[in-house]
Every structure is written in C-alpha cells, then in structure tokens.
Amino acid sequence: MRDAQKEKKPPRHKDTKGRHLRAVRAVLFLVPWCLAVSISSLACADENSDLNLIPGAVGQEPAKPAPDQTQPGAPAAPAPTATAAPTGKTYIEDAFTVESLRSPLAVPLPPSTAPALEIQNRSSLDFTHKWSFDGTLDFSFSDRANLYEENDIAIPSHQDFRNDFREGFVTWEPEAQTYLEAGRINVRHGTALGYNPTDFFKTRTLVDQSSEDPSVIREDRLGVAMVQGQRIFENGSATLAVAPRLASPTAIPTSGPPPSVDPGFGRTNGTNRVLLSGSTELADGVSPEFLAYHDDDGSRFGASVSRTIGQAIVAYGEWAGGEQGSLTSRAIQFGHQTDALPAIVVDPDPRKSFTNDAAVGASWTDGADEITLNAEYHYHQSGFGAADWRNWFAAGRAGKPLVDSLLWYTRAYAQDQQEPMSRQEIFLRADWQDAFIDKLEISAIAFVNLYDGSTLTQLSVSYNLSDDWTVSALGGASVGASRSERGSVPEQANAIAQLVRYF
C-alpha cells in the first residue's frame, strides 16, 4: 500500500556535450515569464469571475502499485521473522540559518522581543526505515530528533530540543491485493506540487525544515494516527482511512518549537476524521481519483487527475469542495476552541457556504538536460480576495493590540492548516539535475499573489560531495510593497547553509 522509501541515488556520469546551452535557454525563458506574471497580476479580473477560472476536468494520481506478493502454497512460519535487512535511510543534518526581519510593519505584530536579525542552528538525527516479516507483515518507522541553538533563546531551555515522531505503523497483507495498516501514517493525495486541495490530512502536520518547496514538505511531515485499508483491483483501487480523535486540539504555537517529546496528537488527531478514496485506470493513461472526506466540521469532496501529453508535458488538476466558513471565521472558531482567543473576539460572519478549491497546472521535462519546469494556478475560495486584504490593512491602522493579534492569528491559522492565505496565486518551480556539472542540483520556487504581485521565492543549490555527504545553500525572500501579502510579513530574507551525512 505504501510507496517504498526513496533510496539515495548513486552518482551519474554521462556525456554533457550540448546540454548546457539548452538549459540556459530554458532558464532565461522562465525568468521573464515569472516577471510578466507578477506585473500582469496587478490588473486582475473582477473577483466575481473567479469561479470561471476553475477548469471542468478534475481527478487524481495513478493508483499505487501493489507490494510484492506472498508465494501461494508457502508453509506458514511458527512466528514472524525478518526475511530481509531493513530498508531506508539514516542521516545527520546541520542547518545554519540567518534571517532578517522587517521593521516597521504595516500591521504591527503583538509585543515581541525578537531581534532584527535571527540566527539559528539546527542539528538533526533523521531515521526512516522499514522492516519486512514473512512477506505479509511490514513495520515502518520515521523519526527526527532536533537540537536548536538560537540567539534569542536561552540555553538550556525546553525549546532547545524537539522530537518529531513522523510515522510508525504496521502493514499487513491478509490476502493478495488487500492491505491493512494501523499506526501513525503520512497519507498524501493530489497531483499538484504547490497546493493540494485533496490532501485532506495535511492540516497541522508541519515540522521544521530548510526548504519552502511544498513537494519536499509533504514528504517530511507528521503522520496521522489511523487505521487504513486498501483493496487493489485490476483497473483501480479503493481505500478507507479512519483517524480517531486522540487528544484535545492544541493551540497554534506562537514562539519557538512545541514541547520536546510531545508526539503532537493534539495537532494531528484533535478531531474524528474519515476519508474514502477510489481510483481507476481509463484509456490513454488517465487515472482519476475521487475522494469523500468527513470530520467534526462537515464533509468535503474531491477529485484529481493527470494526463501525459506527448513526450515531455504532463497536465494535472485537483478540485475539492464543501460547506465551510471563511478563513477568518474558521480561525476565530479554532481560537475559541483552543482558548487562544478571548471570548470578547466575536465571529462577524459564522455562516457556512459551499466553497471550491482548485489547483491546475502542467510540467515540462527536458530529459536530455534533466530540467523540469512547473506552472500552476491555485484557487482557494475561502481565502482573502483584494477587498479582504484592504480590510486587513485598514483594521491594522487602528492601533488596537487585540485587533492586531486577531489579524496575525488569522495568518498563523492559514499556515498551520497549510492552505493559501489568498484566493488566487500562481506557483512556479524549476529544477535542474546535474546542472553544469554532475551531482549539482539547482531548484527555484515562487508563489505569486495575483492581487498585489507580491512573491515568496527560494533558490536552492545542492551538491553531492560523495555518496555519503551533501552540501546545500538556500536563499529566500518575501518581496512586495509594505501593504501586500508578502511585503507585510516580518520575515524579509534568509540564507541557509546545510550539511548532510548519510549512513
């Protein structure tokens, strides 16, 4: 049922003649395109036409291949014994971050002692492995221990150490093509890279890491405690996941990492949730997936699909819809539920309505040069439109601390839920494997707000010194006017140096 852990790629050696010129041309093509998108976003169409931008075709990623099957007629063993060495990876990582903060802000932050320049060093031990027993029983475990050193946190303190228990589950195959899993599992759905409306279990699962790339974040996050069953058919599959409430929802952390060894079930299992999904194989390699999701707040439905066009292009799309309140309304309700907001804060509009979320895009790959470009449009109907952003900044001018706290709490809630703050945005991504020389990878991402043109961007350069050592440098920035989405956040720019040792 579960995808196998990705093994470290061995060094590749090949003839690079002629590929550099084509790669540079592709990058030069992308840069003016990104700038054009940012500039043109300042003249967006009327918001009443937003729904017209949602394409009619929606669907999902292909069904997962079945694990190795048990040979029929094999004698039963008296007790489970390991049949193969564990597979997976273990590594230590050190990430040194320097981040500059904006001041003053268009909407003041609640009182804080944070310095103008934040310096942090994070040292982590990361362990992800899988054990197989007798061909029908597997155990998977994934965990990261983090040690922090920061210029604004005393040493020692309870914020110096945090353990992220990401996954720990058992997979049992009682019969061919049927799988049962129980434990903490990172369940991922969706075909897009920048935003996945059908990834219903992504909420409240973020852990600290260097990359802002959503495709990296979704692979390295907290799982959800659940029981899951899957049946694979000749032309598709069906899956049912049940995640019970195990703890009361915990408040959104406002400063520093949460307590050291807390498994975080108040984040991932603070409500009862059920997800039913099914996929099928259609003609021409199209494999749509359909999903039905329910939690204590109501039900949502979704679909996703991808389609290969020619040899180099893959088009894909996702959609999810259901009854829910606005982003501000849901943030206030969650703040009351977790006692993070005082009772004096009243929800101005608690009504629910049917809202749509969509992500549509395409990827282009140059196989010879190992370059991949992605472009996506994201629509989040309950997020902020242009009028909402004007109201947000206008409320911040009143200079009332309680109002300012509520305004920033709404943004913290959106980040905690891993949903866009704005109703419309563009996501761009470029990745170049073996760039200029072998074992050098260059990646860049950009989120562009389609109302004010502000942008969150990050550039990453990674080089494999050997099979065991990787060194990386990352730089990011939030660019925009002071009264824009990205230009109003305190984080202005950062630089990260990262060293990883694999075992």
Image (spheres, helix red, strand yellow):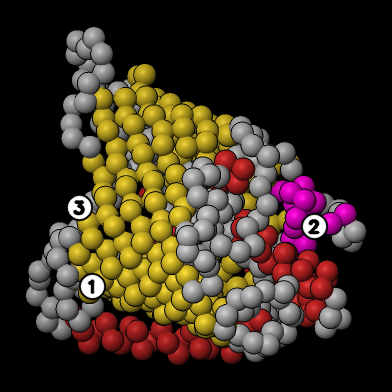
For the residues marked 3 and 1, what is the alpha-carbon distance in whole angstroms?
17 Å
Where's residue 313, x and y in %? 37, 66
How far is mark 3 from mark 2, CA to CA?
46 Å
- The tag on residue 341 is 2
Picture disc at residue 463 = 1
Helix, strand or loop for disc 2: loop
- Relative vertical location of residue 442 with respect to residue 143 in this rendering, above or below: below
Mark in the foreground, 2 or 1: 2
* Between discs 3 and 1, the one toward the N terminus: 1
In percent of width and height, residue 134 lies at 24, 22
Pick the residue in front: 194 or 223. 223
Is 325 colored magenta in this rendering?
yes
> Which circle marks residue 503 in the picture?
3
Report whether 472 appears left or right of 97. left
Q: How many marks?
A: 3
The x and y percentages for residue 333 are 79, 52
**Residue at the spot x=40%, y=64% of the render?**
122
Circle 3 crowding by C-alpha within 10 Å: few under 14, some 14–19, many from 20:
few
Residue at coordinates 82% horizontally, 73% vertically from top-left?
401
Task: Assign a secondary structure to mark 1.
Answer: strand
User: Relative to 119, is 436 on the left or the right?
Assistant: left
Q: Start and end of the magenta stretch?
A: 321-343
Please tell me whether mark 3 or mark 1 is closer to you in this view.
Answer: 3
Residue 201 appears in view? yes
Looking at marks 3 and 2 on the same chain, the residue that comes earlier in the sequence is marked by 2
Residue 399 included in the magenta stretch of the image: no
